[in-house]
Image (cartoon, rainbow, N blue to C red):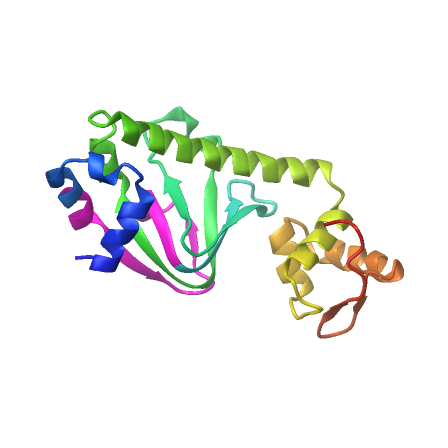
Amino acid sequence: MISKEDIKHLEKIFPFWLDINQNDRAKIILSSRILSLKKNAIFFNSHDLDGLLFLKSGKLRFFLSHLEARELPLYYLNNMEIEFFEDFSDNSTSTILDIAFIVEKNSEILLIPYSVLNLFRDKYSVMEKFLHNLTREKFSKSLLSLQNILLIPLKDRLLKFLYSLNKTEISLTHEEIAKNLGSSREVISRNLKILEKENFLKVNRKKIIILDRGDIL
């Protein structure tokens, strides 16, 4: 049974919460559960997580998983944000966008199962519209990220990523940076050397030191 605090989260997740009758709200509450996810855990299309995921704390990094050559980064989920995993097991569109995620920090999520939400899609038009919009937002974010990978030079994406960390000294390894940008360690190392020559940063064995924020952001 989820806590009173979590029930308040449900009221914020669903703007139309009070438009759902009391019995149906009770079904959602009783079916919801709290899950703790350990850092570095990876979830590849786990049907255990089909449904609406509300991140109470932590950080998740989503990526495209069906390409074997490398992970293609998509977006992050931060505190108090939601993600929707729809069950496409009986739908031929299941291979269009195969999204997985890795737990960047120890995280706690509130999960509302897809099977329960699906019961109310026909009954409540606002529920159908809400879930449809979440799916559309997921595709839009994913396609925008993929577009950036294709159209924006890696050097610029690398510098923007480093700036986004809001630190003057960064301790990430080249391999960790590569995973965030969908590249390889060797390519990241080569582009860091280029940025170092251009006086944006300085690279040593243990850290990257930001020297000039430039005008990219």
Span of residues in magenta: 27-56
Residue 33 in sight: no
- Is 209 placed left or right of 171 in the picture? right
Residue 96 in sight: yes
- Residue at the far bottom in the pictured view: 206
The quarter of the image holding the N terminus is bottom left
Number of marks in picture:
0
Where is residue 205, by image quadrant? bottom right
Q: Is residue 123 above or below residue 160?
A: above
- Is 142 placed left or right of 212 in the picture? left
Where is residue 26, by image quadrant? top left
Q: Position of residue 147 (x, y in %)?
A: 64, 35
Taking the spot 74% from the left edge, 54% from the top edge, the residue there is 159
- Residue at the far right in the pictured view: 197
Residue 95 is a magenta residue: no
Observer-nearest of 13 and 63: 13
- Is 3 placed left or right of 95 in the picture? left
Q: Position of residue 60 (x, y in %)?
A: 47, 55
Observer-nearest of 55 and 171: 55
Q: Position of residue 169 (x, y in %)?
A: 70, 71
Taking the spot 89% from the left edge, 60% from the top edge, the residue there is 197
Q: Position of residue 160 (x, y in %)?
A: 70, 52
Residue 48 is a magenta residue: yes
